Amino acid sequence: MRQSPEKELDIFELELAVKWAHAASLMDANTEVSYLFALSETALKEKLERLKSASPDTDPLTLEELREMDGEPVWISYFAGGPNVCMLVDAKHDVFRDAHGGFAVFENLGRTWIAYRRKPEEGTT
């Protein structure tokens, strides 16, 4: 699979490239080409780890996690629909507050809304 220079590899493509480079490096351990494949494998693994660590955390937050995030922003996705809303955690009062005076109470977690660390992609919640 040939990639254009402007397209970044995604996680799946990088994992395949790492496996291919590893297999190629094992073909003949005494050749310069195998050494280059081994270097490529190492570089690809490093890029893969960076990409994985930079990927958004898409798991919903638990009540315990939310209570440890006082003052931090979270994204609220309401089950009834509408846009995702960024709110600040107010752990002292067990609520989230937005800039327009709106709020969501912790006790409704999983009933009417769900919270995320990062903005979820539209249509994935």
Image (tube, grey):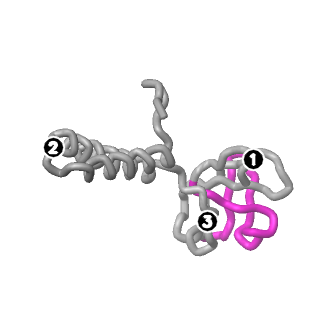
Which numbered disc flags the more N-terminal residue, 1 or 2?
2
- Label 3 sits on residue: 61
Q: Amino acid at mark 3?
A: Leu
Mark 3 crowdedness (10 Å alpha carbons): few <14, some 14-19, many ≥20: some
Instruction: Give the x, y percent position of residue 116.
Output: 62, 57
Residue found at x 39% / y 52%: 19
Between 24 and 91, the residue placed more toward the observer is 24
Q: Amino acid at mark 1?
A: Gly
Distance of label 1 from label 2 (alpha carbons): 50 Å
Q: Residue furthest right?
A: 80
Instruction: Give the x, y percent position of residue 113.
Output: 76, 61
Instruction: Give the x, y percent position of residue 98.
Output: 69, 50
User: Is residue 46 visible to the viewer in this orientation of the structure?
Assistant: no
Q: Is residue 14 left or right of residue 120?
A: left
Q: Which mark is residue 123?
A: 1
Instruction: Give the x, y percent position of residue 50.
Output: 38, 48
Which numbered disc flags the more N-terminal residue, 3 or 1?
3
Judge depth for marks 3 and 2 and give the one in front: 2
